Image: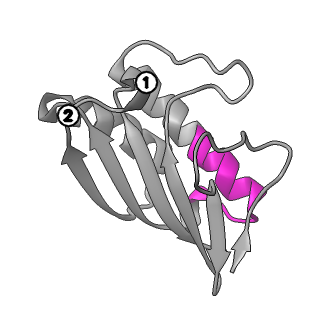
Amino acid sequence: MKIVSTPKLPAANGHYSTCIEHGGLLYLSGQLPFDPETREMPEGIEAQTEQTLRNIDLVLREAGSSRDKVLQMRLYIPRIEMWDAVNQVYSEFFADHKPARCVVPTRELHFGALVEIEATACL
């Protein structure tokens, strides 16, 4: 088991690793919609979903993988009414690739975010 850590990845804010590699698989912790350079969060579910997916893309690239190697995604949103908007941004991000996925409506998310996404991918 190896912790994936590079200077381009923001440090974890709690007792967790952003990404763990084990047996050729990558396990990405839940990503929030913060810009990794400015630490600002965009407004609205579409912009937040796009930023969160860009963050996942960054982690995957830094770990030696890519979005077309994502096996499964878990998306957390505070209200099921956001599903259509999230799905639209998500489908544009992945294009023809369709990882296994679940969308979990929750209550509020940390820092007031409207989306959090975790992923499993292969190298």
Query: Viewed as shown, does residue 33 lie left or right of 113?
Result: right
Identified by mark 2, the residue type is: Arg
Relative to 96, say whether 69 is above or below: below
Q: CA distance from mark 1 to mark 2?
A: 12 Å
The quadrant of the image that shows the N terminus is bottom right
The image's mark for residue 71 is none
Query: Viewed as shown, does residue 99 lie left or right of 83?
Result: right
Whether residue 62 is in magenta: the answer is yes
Residue 24 pos. (x, y %):
65, 83
Q: How many marks?
A: 2
Residue 122 pos. (x, y %):
59, 75
Dot 2: what SS?
loop
Q: How is the image coloured?
A: one colour
The image's mark for residue 111 is 1
- Tell me which segment is drawn in magenta: 55-67
The residue identified by callout 2 is: 107
Relative to 111, say whether 19 is above or below: below
Whether residue 41 is in magenta: the answer is no
Q: Residue at x 55, y 59 (%)?
A: 28
Residue 41 pos. (x, y %):
53, 18
Dot 1: what SS?
helix
The outermost residue toward the bottom is 23
Near mark 2 (Cα within 10 A), the count class, few <14, some 14-19 or many ≥20, is: few
Task: Choose top left, top right, bottom left or bottom right for residue 23.
Answer: bottom right
Q: Main secondary structure of the magenta part?
A: helix
Identified by mark 1, the residue type is: Phe
